[in-house]
Image (tube, rainbow, N blue to C red):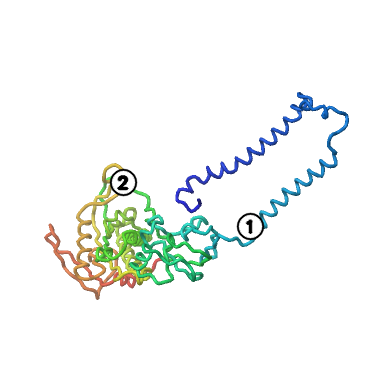
Amino acid sequence: MRGRAWFPRYEILLYTVALLVPIFALLGFVNGARSLERVYAEHGGYGDTAYVSQRPRVDPALMENIRLALYAGFGGLIAGTFALRALPTRGRIRVRYPDGRLAAVSLGFSVLEASRAAGIPHVSVCGGRGRCSTCRVRVIQGLEGQPAPEAAERATLARVGAPDNVRLACQFRPIHSVTVVPILDTDSLGIKKQLAQQDGEGRERRIAVLFCDLRDFTRIAEHKLPFDTVFLLNRYFEMVGEAVESSGGVVDKFIGDGALAIFGLKTPFQEACLQSLAAAARLSKGIQALNQTFNGELEQPLRLAIGLHAGPAIIGEMGYGRATSLTAVGDTINTASRLEGLAKEHDAELAVSVELVRRAGLDLGGNMRLDIGLRGRQATLETWILASATQLSEVLPAQG
Protein backbone atom coordinates (compact mmCIF):
# COMPACT_ATOMS: atom_id res chain seq x y z
CA MET A 1 0.00 0.00 0.00
CA ARG A 2 2.99 2.33 0.38
CA GLY A 3 3.00 2.89 -3.37
CA ARG A 4 -0.50 4.35 -3.35
CA ALA A 5 -1.03 8.11 -3.39
CA TRP A 6 -3.49 8.01 -0.47
CA PHE A 7 -1.22 6.00 1.85
CA PRO A 8 0.73 8.92 3.41
CA ARG A 9 -2.54 10.47 4.66
CA TYR A 10 -3.52 7.37 6.63
CA GLU A 11 -0.09 5.94 7.45
CA ILE A 12 -0.13 6.97 11.14
CA LEU A 13 -3.69 5.67 11.65
CA LEU A 14 -2.90 2.31 10.05
CA TYR A 15 0.33 2.01 11.99
CA THR A 16 -1.52 2.74 15.25
CA VAL A 17 -4.12 0.04 14.56
CA ALA A 18 -1.43 -2.48 13.60
CA LEU A 19 0.41 -1.74 16.84
CA LEU A 20 -2.58 -1.78 19.19
CA VAL A 21 -4.18 -5.04 18.00
CA PRO A 22 -1.38 -7.36 19.26
CA ILE A 23 -0.92 -5.25 22.40
CA PHE A 24 -4.59 -5.56 23.34
CA ALA A 25 -4.47 -9.30 22.54
CA LEU A 26 -1.55 -9.82 24.92
CA LEU A 27 -3.24 -7.74 27.61
CA GLY A 28 -6.29 -10.00 27.25
CA PHE A 29 -4.16 -13.08 27.87
CA VAL A 30 -2.57 -11.46 30.94
CA ASN A 31 -5.95 -10.44 32.33
CA GLY A 32 -7.34 -13.93 31.78
CA ALA A 33 -4.38 -15.55 33.52
CA ARG A 34 -4.78 -13.27 36.53
CA SER A 35 -8.45 -14.24 36.87
CA LEU A 36 -7.76 -18.00 36.90
CA GLU A 37 -6.69 -18.12 40.54
CA ARG A 38 -9.86 -16.36 41.72
CA VAL A 39 -12.12 -18.51 39.54
CA TYR A 40 -10.38 -21.69 40.71
CA ALA A 41 -10.91 -20.77 44.37
CA GLU A 42 -14.56 -19.86 43.86
CA HIS A 43 -15.49 -23.07 42.05
CA GLY A 44 -13.36 -25.49 44.01
CA GLY A 45 -11.28 -26.72 41.13
CA TYR A 46 -14.22 -26.48 38.69
CA GLY A 47 -15.98 -29.38 40.41
CA ASP A 48 -13.13 -31.85 39.79
CA THR A 49 -12.29 -33.72 43.02
CA ALA A 50 -8.84 -34.39 41.70
CA TYR A 51 -8.01 -30.71 42.21
CA VAL A 52 -8.84 -30.81 45.92
CA SER A 53 -6.72 -33.90 46.47
CA GLN A 54 -3.59 -33.57 48.53
CA ARG A 55 -1.53 -35.08 45.72
CA PRO A 56 -0.45 -32.75 42.90
CA ARG A 57 -1.88 -33.82 39.55
CA VAL A 58 0.99 -32.45 37.43
CA ASP A 59 4.69 -32.93 38.06
CA PRO A 60 6.27 -29.46 38.76
CA ALA A 61 9.45 -30.49 36.94
CA LEU A 62 7.44 -31.25 33.82
CA MET A 63 5.74 -27.85 34.00
CA GLU A 64 9.14 -26.15 34.24
CA ASN A 65 10.35 -28.03 31.18
CA ILE A 66 7.24 -26.96 29.26
CA ARG A 67 7.82 -23.33 30.26
CA LEU A 68 11.43 -23.45 29.06
CA ALA A 69 10.33 -25.12 25.82
CA LEU A 70 7.83 -22.32 25.15
CA TYR A 71 10.49 -19.67 25.69
CA ALA A 72 12.86 -21.54 23.40
CA GLY A 73 10.15 -21.86 20.78
CA PHE A 74 9.32 -18.16 20.81
CA GLY A 75 13.02 -17.30 20.64
CA GLY A 76 13.48 -19.65 17.71
CA LEU A 77 10.57 -18.07 15.84
CA ILE A 78 12.01 -14.57 16.29
CA ALA A 79 15.49 -15.69 15.22
CA GLY A 80 14.02 -17.53 12.24
CA THR A 81 12.14 -14.39 11.15
CA PHE A 82 15.35 -12.37 11.05
CA ALA A 83 17.15 -15.19 9.26
CA LEU A 84 14.46 -15.42 6.58
CA ARG A 85 14.57 -11.65 6.02
CA ALA A 86 18.30 -11.89 5.37
CA LEU A 87 17.84 -14.56 2.70
CA PRO A 88 17.15 -13.62 -0.94
CA THR A 89 13.42 -13.86 -1.49
CA ARG A 90 11.55 -14.67 -4.63
CA GLY A 91 8.90 -12.25 -5.78
CA ARG A 92 10.83 -9.13 -4.71
CA ILE A 93 12.96 -6.79 -6.79
CA ARG A 94 15.47 -4.09 -5.97
CA VAL A 95 15.56 -0.69 -7.67
CA ARG A 96 18.91 1.05 -7.26
CA TYR A 97 19.51 4.77 -7.72
CA PRO A 98 22.73 6.63 -8.66
CA ASP A 99 23.31 8.05 -5.15
CA GLY A 100 23.44 4.57 -3.62
CA ARG A 101 19.87 4.47 -2.35
CA LEU A 102 17.89 1.26 -2.74
CA ALA A 103 14.17 0.47 -2.91
CA ALA A 104 13.15 -3.17 -2.31
CA VAL A 105 9.54 -3.82 -3.37
CA SER A 106 7.30 -6.68 -4.36
CA LEU A 107 7.08 -7.89 -7.92
CA GLY A 108 4.52 -5.84 -9.84
CA PHE A 109 5.47 -2.44 -8.43
CA SER A 110 6.41 0.29 -10.91
CA VAL A 111 9.68 2.18 -10.53
CA LEU A 112 7.71 5.27 -9.49
CA GLU A 113 5.87 3.29 -6.79
CA ALA A 114 9.21 1.90 -5.62
CA SER A 115 10.58 5.43 -5.27
CA ARG A 116 7.57 6.51 -3.23
CA ALA A 117 7.71 3.41 -1.02
CA ALA A 118 11.35 4.15 -0.20
CA GLY A 119 10.71 7.86 0.36
CA ILE A 120 12.87 8.86 -2.61
CA PRO A 121 11.67 12.08 -4.33
CA HIS A 122 10.69 11.42 -7.93
CA VAL A 123 9.20 13.88 -10.41
CA SER A 124 5.73 12.98 -11.67
CA VAL A 125 3.68 15.98 -12.77
CA CYS A 126 0.65 13.97 -13.90
CA GLY A 127 0.58 11.87 -10.74
CA GLY A 128 1.85 8.64 -12.29
CA ARG A 129 -0.88 8.20 -14.89
CA GLY A 130 1.38 8.07 -17.92
CA ARG A 131 0.10 11.39 -19.27
CA CYS A 132 3.48 13.13 -19.19
CA SER A 133 7.15 12.21 -19.51
CA THR A 134 8.50 13.96 -16.41
CA CYS A 135 8.97 10.71 -14.44
CA ARG A 136 11.13 9.04 -17.10
CA VAL A 137 14.30 7.24 -16.05
CA ARG A 138 17.40 6.00 -17.83
CA VAL A 139 17.98 2.28 -17.16
CA ILE A 140 21.72 1.78 -16.84
CA GLN A 141 21.67 -1.83 -15.64
CA GLY A 142 19.16 -4.67 -15.80
CA LEU A 143 17.22 -3.65 -18.92
CA GLU A 144 17.62 -7.05 -20.54
CA GLY A 145 14.60 -9.30 -20.20
CA GLN A 146 12.28 -6.55 -18.93
CA PRO A 147 8.72 -6.14 -20.28
CA ALA A 148 8.53 -4.01 -23.43
CA PRO A 149 6.70 -0.66 -23.25
CA GLU A 150 2.98 -0.82 -23.91
CA ALA A 151 1.27 1.35 -26.51
CA ALA A 152 0.65 4.40 -24.29
CA GLU A 153 4.19 4.45 -22.89
CA ARG A 154 5.68 3.83 -26.32
CA ALA A 155 3.74 6.75 -27.81
CA THR A 156 4.85 9.14 -25.06
CA LEU A 157 8.50 8.11 -25.33
CA ALA A 158 8.38 8.48 -29.11
CA ARG A 159 6.92 11.96 -28.82
CA VAL A 160 9.82 13.18 -26.65
CA GLY A 161 12.39 11.33 -28.76
CA ALA A 162 13.59 9.09 -25.91
CA PRO A 163 16.26 6.43 -26.63
CA ASP A 164 15.69 2.71 -26.06
CA ASN A 165 17.10 2.70 -22.51
CA VAL A 166 14.65 5.37 -21.29
CA ARG A 167 11.37 4.29 -19.70
CA LEU A 168 8.46 5.98 -17.95
CA ALA A 169 8.88 5.21 -14.25
CA CYS A 170 5.11 5.10 -13.69
CA GLN A 171 4.59 2.48 -16.42
CA PHE A 172 7.81 0.46 -16.14
CA ARG A 173 7.20 -2.56 -13.86
CA PRO A 174 10.48 -4.50 -13.79
CA ILE A 175 10.49 -8.26 -13.28
CA HIS A 176 14.05 -8.31 -11.92
CA SER A 177 16.37 -5.82 -10.22
CA VAL A 178 17.38 -2.69 -12.12
CA THR A 179 19.54 0.40 -11.69
CA VAL A 180 17.94 3.63 -12.88
CA VAL A 181 18.78 7.33 -13.12
CA PRO A 182 15.86 9.81 -13.02
CA ILE A 183 16.34 12.21 -15.93
CA LEU A 184 14.53 15.19 -14.43
CA ASP A 185 15.53 16.34 -10.95
CA THR A 186 13.06 17.22 -8.19
CA ASP A 187 14.63 20.53 -7.20
CA SER A 188 12.70 22.48 -9.80
CA LEU A 189 9.10 21.54 -9.21
CA GLY A 190 6.87 24.50 -8.82
CA ILE A 191 7.70 28.13 -8.24
CA LYS A 192 9.69 29.04 -5.19
CA LYS A 193 8.13 31.26 -2.59
CA GLN A 194 8.44 34.93 -3.39
CA LEU A 195 9.84 37.56 -1.11
CA ALA A 196 7.51 38.74 1.62
CA GLN A 197 5.12 41.41 0.56
CA GLN A 198 6.32 44.79 1.64
CA ASP A 199 5.06 48.37 1.68
CA GLY A 200 1.56 47.51 0.51
CA GLU A 201 0.03 50.99 0.87
CA GLY A 202 -0.38 52.98 -2.33
CA ARG A 203 2.47 55.45 -2.82
CA GLU A 204 4.62 56.89 -5.58
CA ARG A 205 8.20 55.70 -5.88
CA ARG A 206 10.93 55.71 -8.48
CA ILE A 207 11.62 52.14 -9.50
CA ALA A 208 13.23 50.05 -12.22
CA VAL A 209 10.96 47.68 -14.13
CA LEU A 210 11.84 44.51 -16.04
CA PHE A 211 9.59 42.80 -18.55
CA CYS A 212 10.66 39.47 -20.06
CA ASP A 213 8.93 37.06 -22.38
CA LEU A 214 9.69 33.78 -24.14
CA ARG A 215 9.79 34.16 -27.89
CA ASP A 216 7.83 31.71 -30.08
CA PHE A 217 6.90 29.63 -27.05
CA THR A 218 3.44 28.89 -28.47
CA ARG A 219 5.05 27.15 -31.41
CA ILE A 220 7.32 25.17 -29.08
CA ALA A 221 4.40 24.12 -26.87
CA GLU A 222 2.48 22.74 -29.86
CA HIS A 223 4.99 19.88 -30.11
CA LYS A 224 5.08 18.98 -26.41
CA LEU A 225 2.70 17.15 -24.09
CA PRO A 226 0.59 19.49 -21.90
CA PHE A 227 2.12 18.26 -18.64
CA ASP A 228 5.64 18.59 -20.12
CA THR A 229 4.80 22.16 -21.12
CA VAL A 230 3.77 22.93 -17.52
CA PHE A 231 6.99 21.41 -16.23
CA LEU A 232 9.10 23.42 -18.69
CA LEU A 233 7.27 26.65 -17.81
CA ASN A 234 7.79 26.05 -14.10
CA ARG A 235 11.50 25.55 -14.69
CA TYR A 236 11.56 28.82 -16.63
CA PHE A 237 9.52 30.68 -14.00
CA GLU A 238 11.84 29.41 -11.27
CA MET A 239 14.87 30.59 -13.22
CA VAL A 240 13.27 34.03 -13.60
CA GLY A 241 12.40 34.19 -9.90
CA GLU A 242 15.90 33.24 -8.81
CA ALA A 243 17.51 35.75 -11.19
CA VAL A 244 15.26 38.57 -9.98
CA GLU A 245 15.45 37.79 -6.28
CA SER A 246 19.20 37.21 -6.25
CA SER A 247 19.58 40.64 -7.87
CA GLY A 248 17.44 42.32 -5.20
CA GLY A 249 14.10 42.60 -6.98
CA VAL A 250 10.62 41.14 -6.56
CA VAL A 251 8.59 39.28 -9.17
CA ASP A 252 5.30 41.16 -9.45
CA LYS A 253 3.46 38.62 -11.57
CA PHE A 254 3.73 35.99 -14.29
CA ILE A 255 1.62 36.61 -17.37
CA GLY A 256 1.45 33.60 -19.69
CA ASP A 257 5.11 32.92 -20.46
CA GLY A 258 6.13 36.46 -19.49
CA ALA A 259 7.08 38.05 -16.18
CA LEU A 260 7.07 41.51 -14.60
CA ALA A 261 9.68 42.32 -11.96
CA ILE A 262 10.16 45.43 -9.81
CA PHE A 263 13.39 46.81 -8.36
CA GLY A 264 13.75 49.58 -5.81
CA LEU A 265 10.99 48.92 -3.32
CA LYS A 266 13.48 49.38 -0.49
CA THR A 267 16.65 50.47 -2.23
CA PRO A 268 17.86 53.79 -3.70
CA PHE A 269 16.97 54.53 -7.30
CA GLN A 270 20.51 54.15 -8.64
CA GLU A 271 20.91 50.77 -6.95
CA ALA A 272 17.56 49.66 -8.34
CA CYS A 273 18.76 50.43 -11.87
CA LEU A 274 21.92 48.40 -11.29
CA GLN A 275 19.88 45.54 -9.88
CA SER A 276 17.62 45.41 -12.92
CA LEU A 277 20.62 45.25 -15.27
CA ALA A 278 22.18 42.48 -13.16
CA ALA A 279 18.91 40.56 -13.30
CA ALA A 280 18.82 40.85 -17.10
CA ALA A 281 22.34 39.40 -17.29
CA ARG A 282 21.34 36.52 -15.00
CA LEU A 283 18.24 35.86 -17.10
CA SER A 284 20.37 35.57 -20.22
CA LYS A 285 22.71 33.07 -18.54
CA GLY A 286 19.74 31.22 -17.04
CA ILE A 287 18.03 30.70 -20.38
CA GLN A 288 21.29 29.33 -21.79
CA ALA A 289 21.47 26.86 -18.90
CA LEU A 290 17.87 25.79 -19.53
CA ASN A 291 18.66 25.18 -23.19
CA GLN A 292 21.54 22.93 -22.15
CA THR A 293 19.28 21.05 -19.71
CA PHE A 294 16.62 20.41 -22.35
CA ASN A 295 19.06 19.89 -25.20
CA GLY A 296 17.62 17.36 -27.63
CA GLU A 297 14.06 17.76 -26.34
CA LEU A 298 13.31 21.11 -27.97
CA GLU A 299 13.10 21.59 -31.70
CA GLN A 300 14.51 25.09 -31.24
CA PRO A 301 16.23 26.74 -28.26
CA LEU A 302 14.35 29.01 -25.88
CA ARG A 303 14.89 32.73 -26.53
CA LEU A 304 14.14 35.70 -24.32
CA ALA A 305 13.04 39.26 -25.02
CA ILE A 306 13.71 41.68 -22.16
CA GLY A 307 12.63 45.30 -21.71
CA LEU A 308 14.06 47.59 -18.98
CA HIS A 309 12.98 51.06 -17.98
CA ALA A 310 13.09 53.21 -14.83
CA GLY A 311 10.97 56.04 -13.51
CA PRO A 312 8.10 56.91 -11.16
CA ALA A 313 5.23 54.49 -10.55
CA ILE A 314 2.42 53.93 -8.06
CA ILE A 315 3.15 50.96 -5.77
CA GLY A 316 0.40 49.37 -3.70
CA GLU A 317 -1.84 46.41 -2.92
CA MET A 318 -4.30 46.06 -5.77
CA GLY A 319 -6.95 43.51 -6.64
CA TYR A 320 -9.92 41.90 -4.94
CA GLY A 321 -10.09 39.29 -2.18
CA ARG A 322 -7.46 36.61 -2.49
CA ALA A 323 -6.42 38.05 -5.84
CA THR A 324 -4.99 41.13 -4.10
CA SER A 325 -1.23 41.52 -4.48
CA LEU A 326 1.52 44.11 -4.48
CA THR A 327 1.88 45.63 -7.92
CA ALA A 328 2.87 48.78 -9.77
CA VAL A 329 1.06 50.91 -12.33
CA GLY A 330 2.04 53.92 -14.36
CA ASP A 331 3.75 55.09 -17.52
CA THR A 332 7.05 53.46 -16.48
CA ILE A 333 5.42 50.02 -16.55
CA ASN A 334 3.90 50.62 -19.98
CA THR A 335 7.22 51.83 -21.37
CA ALA A 336 9.10 48.76 -20.11
CA SER A 337 6.48 46.56 -21.80
CA ARG A 338 6.93 48.52 -25.04
CA LEU A 339 10.71 48.04 -24.86
CA GLU A 340 10.25 44.29 -24.49
CA GLY A 341 8.25 44.33 -27.74
CA LEU A 342 10.97 46.47 -29.34
CA ALA A 343 13.57 43.80 -28.52
CA LYS A 344 11.47 41.27 -30.43
CA GLU A 345 11.13 43.60 -33.41
CA HIS A 346 14.93 43.88 -33.70
CA ASP A 347 15.55 40.16 -33.00
CA ALA A 348 17.51 41.15 -29.90
CA GLU A 349 17.48 39.90 -26.31
CA LEU A 350 17.45 43.25 -24.51
CA ALA A 351 16.10 46.74 -25.05
CA VAL A 352 16.94 49.13 -22.20
CA SER A 353 16.33 52.84 -21.93
CA VAL A 354 19.39 55.09 -21.99
CA GLU A 355 18.00 56.86 -18.91
CA LEU A 356 18.16 53.65 -16.83
CA VAL A 357 21.73 52.91 -17.94
CA ARG A 358 22.77 56.49 -17.16
CA ARG A 359 21.18 56.32 -13.69
CA ALA A 360 23.11 53.10 -13.05
CA GLY A 361 26.36 54.92 -13.90
CA LEU A 362 27.22 52.64 -16.81
CA ASP A 363 28.01 53.11 -20.49
CA LEU A 364 26.87 50.76 -23.26
CA GLY A 365 28.69 52.54 -26.05
CA GLY A 366 29.36 50.34 -29.07
CA ASN A 367 25.86 48.83 -29.11
CA MET A 368 22.90 49.82 -31.28
CA ARG A 369 21.16 52.98 -30.08
CA LEU A 370 17.70 54.04 -31.26
CA ASP A 371 15.30 56.91 -30.66
CA ILE A 372 11.82 55.45 -30.55
CA GLY A 373 8.42 57.11 -30.35
CA LEU A 374 5.90 55.89 -27.80
CA ARG A 375 2.13 56.14 -27.93
CA GLY A 376 0.86 59.11 -25.91
CA ARG A 377 4.31 60.73 -25.65
CA GLN A 378 5.63 63.54 -27.85
CA ALA A 379 9.30 63.07 -26.96
CA THR A 380 11.23 60.08 -28.20
CA LEU A 381 12.88 57.55 -25.90
CA GLU A 382 16.59 56.82 -26.36
CA THR A 383 17.14 53.09 -26.19
CA TRP A 384 20.07 50.67 -26.23
CA ILE A 385 19.54 47.41 -28.19
CA LEU A 386 21.69 44.44 -27.16
CA ALA A 387 21.75 41.15 -29.04
CA SER A 388 22.57 39.34 -25.79
CA ALA A 389 22.07 40.56 -22.23
CA THR A 390 25.22 38.71 -21.17
CA GLN A 391 27.13 41.67 -22.60
CA LEU A 392 26.08 43.54 -19.44
CA SER A 393 28.47 41.38 -17.42
CA GLU A 394 31.35 43.27 -19.02
CA VAL A 395 30.23 46.66 -17.63
CA LEU A 396 28.48 45.69 -14.40
CA PRO A 397 30.53 46.04 -11.19
CA ALA A 398 31.76 42.79 -9.65
CA GLN A 399 29.35 41.38 -7.07
CA GLY A 400 30.67 39.88 -3.89
Q: In the rendered view, does 190 fall on the left or right side of 386?
A: right
Q: Which residue is the site of mark 1?
A: 85
Check disc 1: other Cα within 10 Å, few if <14, some if 14-19, many if 20+.
few
Image quarter of the C terminus = bottom left
Check disc 2: other Cα within 10 Å, few if <14, some if 14-19, many if 20+.
few
Q: Residue 248 versus residue 12: which sits nearer the camera? A: 12
Q: In the rendered view, does 32 fall on the left or right side of 215?
A: right
Q: What element does badge 1 sit on?
A: helix
**Coordinates of residue 373 in the picture (x, y in percent):** 14, 64
Question: Seen from this angle, which residue lies furthest left?
Answer: 378
User: Three-letter amino acid code at disc 1?
Assistant: Arg
Question: Seen from this angle, which residue lies furthest right?
Answer: 54
Residue 200 is labelled as 2
One can see residue 243 in this view: no
Picture layout, residue 374 above or below residue 164: above
Q: Residue sitting at 39 percent across and 56 percent down? A: 129
Q: Residue sitting at 34 percent across and 70 percent down? A: 393
Q: Residue 338 versus residue 275: which sits nearer the camera? A: 338
Q: Residue sitting at 23 percent across and 56 percent down? A: 333
Residue 140 is labelled as none
**Coordinates of residue 194 in the picture (x, y in percent):** 37, 53
Residue contact between numbered discs 1 and 2, judged by CB atoms under 8 Å: no
User: Three-letter amino acid code at disc 2?
Assistant: Gly
Q: Earlier in the sequence, mark 1 or mark 2?
A: 1
Picture layout, residue 29 above or below residue 79: above
Q: Residue 368 versus residue 252: which sits nearer the camera? A: 252
Picture layout, residue 345 above or below residue 82: below
Label 1, label 2: how far apart the Cα atoms are: 61 Å
**Coordinates of residue 26 in the picture (x, y in percent):** 67, 39
Of circles 1 and 2, the one toward us is 1
